[in-house]
Amino acid sequence: MREVFELVRLMEEVGGKVGDYVSPDVVDLGEGYDVVRVSCDNVDFVVIDKGGVELGDRLIGVDSHTSVLRFAAFDVHVVTGALVGRDVYLVPGVQGVRWLGLKLRFRLDNADALDRYSGIIYVKSRYLGRYFDGSYNDEAIRDEVRLHVELRLINIARELSGFILIDGPVFPTPRILGMEGNEYSSLYWGLVKDRVEALRGLRAVGVVKRLGQSHYLARCLGEVYADDYTLAVNKLTPLLGNGGVAAIGPVRIEAGDYGKYCWYVASRLGRRIDVVRVEGLSEDVVEVGRDYVALTMTVGGTAMSIHIADRVARRLNASAVNLISSISPLGITYEGLETIREALSELGG
């Protein structure tokens, strides 16, 4: 983890040049409505027989994990990732990946030091050309660094033989996309474009677990009173036996020139019902992904390949946070101490 030591050197160098503290920009990352088009001309309900699904591909799981370690004058965004299949690739580990983002909580008059370290540490948005100073939105930093890490793993997966399961959406559709003239809108359109280009032509799907604030299925069916999780449970529960799996779809989601197909997959174990949204750029690929996710869902609704990648990425992240906090001489905030506590808990400390 050479990057960690370079990060600490950079913080020590810049820490003596603290300027005026500023508040971060506010960005609306809630689910897009006006900018997102939803359609479902031929919605179907499918009971998936696990015994009838043939695993014809080697599955590859890709996931990342993000934490923020807050110092008095800096925020360190730690983004680790894992690709798990026949072979395993890790970030940190893969060369040339900037998995540490550094945000200054103040304005910096001279960015020479940041520029010297920019090949190793993520200090400036490549979409907006802005340094991550105190005014820069925290979620935007997280999303850009995370995309950088995940795209590197996806590019590795392109060279492997298998079907790729990625944690999260094929591409994001936040409300900020529709705010024309807002520079963060340009940033998120850039994230969408790069994500789609990386996945185009691949046999890959994204798996979205948190559906409590999502309303795409509800909009499609004209039942906007409920969120997607509640609606999927209501629609699919009659089809689920104990241990059964069922799905509803496809739903077409479009934003600008980009589109994706989605299936909602529900699995039941006892009284527990888990629902995920499986997304793909093509209808054929997402149907295959739907069945693979149904076949390999764990308790909690995570496909096994993603579950393993998630566990590895979390452990890596905790180790990195522990190392950074151990060697940095700078003061850590209460929030930073909470991040360290969570890391130690992950490591079993």
Image (spheres, grey):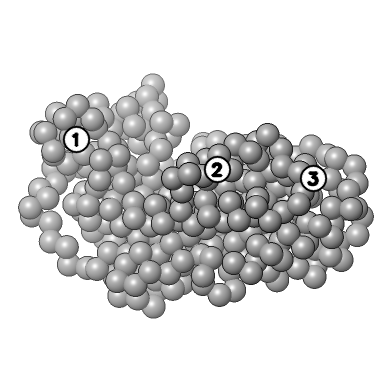
Of pointers 2 and 1, the one earlier in the residue sequence: 2
Q: Give the alpha-carbon distance from disc 3 to disc 1, as whole Å.
A: 47 Å
Q: Secondary structure at mark 3?
A: loop
- Is residue 40 or residue 140 the one in the foreground? 140
Vertically, is 78 above or below 135? below
Crowdedness near tag 1: few (<14), some (14–19) or many (≥20) residues, C-alpha within 10 Å: many
x and y percentages locating residue 234 in the rendered image? 24, 26
Picture disc at residue 174? 2
Q: Is residue 87 left or right of residue 319?
A: left
Residue mark closest to the camera, 2 vs 1:
1
Q: Are marks 2 and 1 in contact (CB under 8 Å)?
A: no
- Is residue 222 or residue 168 the one in the foreground? 168
Quarter that holds the N terminus: bottom right
Vertically, is 268 above or below 63? above
Of pointers 3 and 2, the one earlier in the residue sequence: 3
Residue mark closest to the camera, 3 vs 1:
3
**Residue at 27% over, 56% down:** 289
Q: Is residue 134 left or right of residue 231?
A: right
Picture disc at residue 161? none
The amino acid type, in three-letter code, at marker 3 is: Ala
Picture disc at residue 73? 3
- Is residue 4 or residue 307 the one in the foreground? 4
Vertically, is 129 above or below 119? above
Give the residue at mark 1: 268
Q: Secondary structure at mark 2?
A: loop
Q: Is residue 290 visible?
A: no
Q: Is residue 66 visible?
A: yes
Of all residues, the one furthest to the front in this rendering is 349
Of pointers 3 and 1, the one earlier in the residue sequence: 3
Q: Secondary structure at mark 1?
A: strand
